[in-house]
Image (spheres, helix red, strand yellow):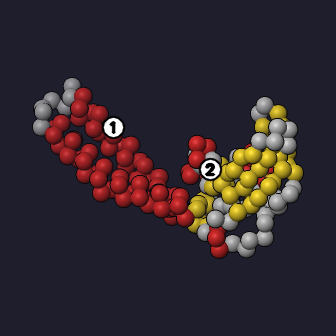
Amino acid sequence: METIPMTIAGNKALEVELLNLKDIERPRIVEEIATARAHGDLKENAEYHAAKEEQGFIEGRIKEIQSKLSRMQVIDVTKLEQDGRCVFGTTVTLMNIVNDKEITYQIVGEDESDISQNKISCHSPIASSIMGKEEGDEVTVKAPKGDIFYEILSVKYI
């Protein structure tokens, strides 16, 4: 069984979502199904069918989260050897060598990646290119629009 790397924050977010689905969403949808059932004929009852569909989604998401949590390897980046290398969980500042623009990313698991928060998947082209590299190294990222050249300015274990 393949393990899933996850930061402490990502693990906590999944646990919170699971609790919400089990303790709030599941009872709410059961109540909606009961209310819709009370309206009579189920064949033409759109509320009932919509509620059953939502129930299926909720139950599927619960199973998905439980599966991920059982296979999860939580990595606390603050407890890793801080040797300046880019590894899972580190926050890395890169400078585009062509235009001198700086960007900072945190390397996270697939489920927690969110480009709007500068969190990139450990399987993304950028993360794959910088993993194992150190501050001062220059890397080439193979992107769909062509190669991008970066210099690693800093690696933080926060």
Quarter containing the C terminus? bottom right
Residue farthest toward the front in the current orientation of the protein: 100
Residue farthest toward the top in the current orientation of the protein: 44
Which residue is rendered at x = 61% and y = 67% of the image?
75
Marks 1 & 2, CB-CB < 8 Å contact: no
Question: In the rendered view, does 103 fall on the left or right side of 38?
Answer: right
Question: In the rendered view, does 151 fall on the left or right side of 32?
Answer: right
Question: In the rendered view, does 45 fall on the left or right side of 58?
Answer: left
What percent of the width, then of the height, locates residue 119?
62, 50
Which residue is rendered at x = 16% and y = 40% of the image?
35
Which residue is rendered at x = 38% and y = 43% of the image?
57
Task: Say which of 154 and 63 sits in front.
Answer: 154
What percent of the width, then of the height, locates residue 91?
68, 58
Which residue is rendered at x = 82% and y = 61% of the image?
134
Q: Which residue is mark 2?
A: 119
Question: Which of the marked residues, 1 or 2, is nearer the chain's N terminus?
Answer: 1
What percent of the width, then of the height, locates residue 53?
33, 37
Q: Is residue 157 above or below residue 62?
A: below
Q: Which residue is mark 1?
A: 53
What percent of the width, then of the height, locates residue 156?
70, 63
Q: Nearer the viewer, mark 1 or mark 2?
A: 2
> Label 2 sits on what residue type?
Lys
The answer to which image quadrant residue 6 occupies is: bottom right
Q: Residues within 10 Å of mark 1 (few under 14, many from 20)?
A: few
Q: Judging from the image, what secondary structure is the residue with disc 2 in?
A: strand
Q: Judging from the image, what secondary structure is the residue with disc 1 in?
A: helix
Task: Say which of 56 and 135 sits in front.
Answer: 135
> Label 1 sits on what residue type?
Glu
Q: Does residue 128 appear in this view?
A: no
In whole angstroms, how far apart are the C-alphas of marks 1 and 2? 32 Å
- The total number of labels drawn is 2
Q: Residues within 10 Å of mark 2 (few under 14, many from 20)?
A: some
